[in-house]
Image (cartoon, rainbow, N blue to C red):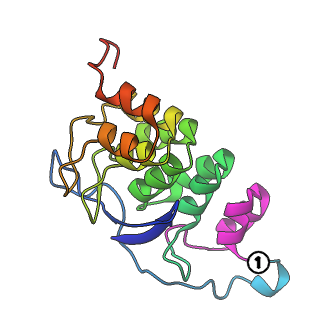
Amino acid sequence: MIIWLCAGVVLLVSCRDEETGGRSGGGGPLAATVTSLGAEDRPGDIWQAAERGDLEAVREYLDTGADPDERNGDGLSALMLAAEAGRSEVVKLLLPRCAEGLDDALFLAACRNHAALVDLLARQGACVHARTGDGRTALMVAAANGAEEAVRALLRHQANRYATDQRDHTAGQIAMMAGHVGLGRLLLARPKPEE
C-alpha cells in the first residue's frame, strides 16, 4: 500500500487485482535512501533523476547497483516519479527492472493525464482494477482530475466504468461532482462497441 497526494486528495493505493485477488505490483518499504552508489559524485539521486527525465543519470544509477524498486522518503519509487512527471523514456528504461509499483505508477500517470504512459503501464501488467484505500480505481482518479485522455486509455484497457467506490460513486459520477461535466457524460453514457 502506498499513500500519495494527487490534486489535493490523499490516496491509499491497494494493489489487489479485483478479478484475481492477487497482487500485480506495489509493496516494499515506504522509506529508502540511496547508499554506497557514490551519490556524492552525482547531483541528486535516482528519484530526482527519474522525475526530471535524466535518462543517462538513471541508467548510471542502475548500472552502479541502485534498486529501482527502492522508495524515497515520500514512499515513491523512481518508476512512480517518472510516471507522474510523464517521463516516458525513463519509464521504459525502468519497467523491465521493476518488480513492483506498476499499479501505483498507473494511478500517478492517470492522475496527471499521461495517456501514453497509462497505456504502456497497462500493457506491461499494471492492474486497471487496483483500488485506493477508499475504493477508487485509476479510472475514478483520472475522472476526478478531468484527465480525459487517461480515462479513454483506461477504458481501452477494460477499466470498469461501473465500479463504485466506498461511497457508491462511479467514475462518471465522480467526474460530474468534480465539475468535469463532459467527461462525466462520456463515462455515464452507454459504451460504444469499441470501448
Q: Amino acid at mark 1?
A: Gly
Magenta stretch: helix, strand or loop mostly? helix
For the C terminus, give its image quadrant.
Answer: top left
Q: Is residue 126 visible?
A: no
Up-down relation of residue 108 to residue 142 (above or below): below
- Assess whether residue 79 is covered by the magenta stretch: no
**Helix, strand or loop status at disc 1:** loop
Residue 101 in view of the camera: yes
Left or right placement of residue 173 versus residue 105 in this view: left
Q: Would you identify the image quadrant in which residue 190 lies?
A: top left
Q: Say which quadrant the N terminus sits in.
A: bottom left
Disc 1 target residue: 44
Q: Residue at x 29, y 52 (%)?
A: 130
Q: Nearest the camera: 58 or 19? A: 19
Q: Nearer the viewer, residue 111 or 76?
A: 111
Q: Nearer the viewer, residue 157 or 23?
A: 157
- How far across and how far down the image is residue 42, in percent? 82, 78
In the rendering, at what x and y percent does residue 51 appear? 68, 62
Compared with 40, 113 (above or below) is above
The x and y percentages for residue 181 are: 43, 33
In magenta, the rendered stretch is 44-69
Q: Find residue 93 and report its horizontal and vertical position in percent.
A: 62, 51
Q: Above or below — where is 45 with respect to 53?
A: below
> Image quarter for residue 158?
top left
Look at the image and say whether residue 53 sits in the magenta stretch.
Answer: yes
Residue found at x 52% / y 59%? 7
Q: Residues within 10 Å of mark 1 (few under 14, many from 20)?
A: few
Q: Is residue 152 left or right of residue 14?
A: right
Vertical placement of 37 versus 147: above or below?
Answer: below
